[in-house]
Image (tube, rainbow, N blue to C red):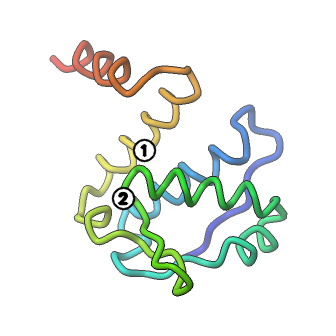
Amino acid sequence: MTIQPPDPASATPPFEQLRAQVAALVAGGDLAAGERLPTVRGLAEQLGLAAGTVARVYRELEADGVVETRGRAGTFVAESAAAGEGDVGAAAATYAAAARRAGLTRAEAHNALDRAWP
């Protein structure tokens, strides 16, 4: 697994770039269920980000059920998150990120998806 540094030229904040990237790696199967993620401090140093940024990404991914924190053992890909959604999971992660950036609530994002469904 290789997590790439955020693109500084992107209009998307580094936090969101990293969150979407990790979610897509999990959804695409590049990060397997039970796989340990780098430590917050280690990943922050590797990517040239503040540790608080990486910690926030991990917290949000945990709230979304993508990763789970096991105390001092570290952060791991959640079993349920790597259930084989493939491209659909990656697209969902991208959509969720866009909806958050647009300031939509979860219900508003669901309504938008319902309207788009033929």
State the image quarter where residue 5 is shown: bottom right
Q: Looking at the image, is 13 positioned above or below residue 44? A: above
Label 1 crowding class (10 Å Cα cut-off): few <14, some 14-19, many 20+? many
Q: Position of residue 93 (x, y in %)?
A: 42, 44
Residue 34 left/right relative to 12: left
Residue at screen point 65% across, 78% down: 39
- Amino acid, disc 2: Ala
26 on left or right of 86: right
Outermost residue toward the left in this view: 118
Local packing at callout 2 (Cα closer than 10 Å; few below 14, some 14-19, many 20+) is many
Q: Amino acid at mark 1?
A: Ala
Q: Secondary structure at mark 2?
A: helix
Relative to the observer, which residue lies in front, 41 or 30? 41
Residue under pointer 2 = 27
Q: Are marks 1 and 2 in contact (CB under 8 Å)?
A: yes
Residue at the spot 62% in from the left edge and 78% down from the top edge? 38
Name the outermost residue toward the front: 71
The correct choice, above or below, for 11 with respect to 30 in the image is above
Residue 86 in the image, given as x and y percentages of width and height: 29, 57
| Residue in front for this viewpoint, 63 or 83 | 63
Quadrant position of the C terminus in the picture = top left
What residue sits right under mark 1 in the picture?
93
Measured Cα–Cα span from mark 1 to mark 2: 8 Å
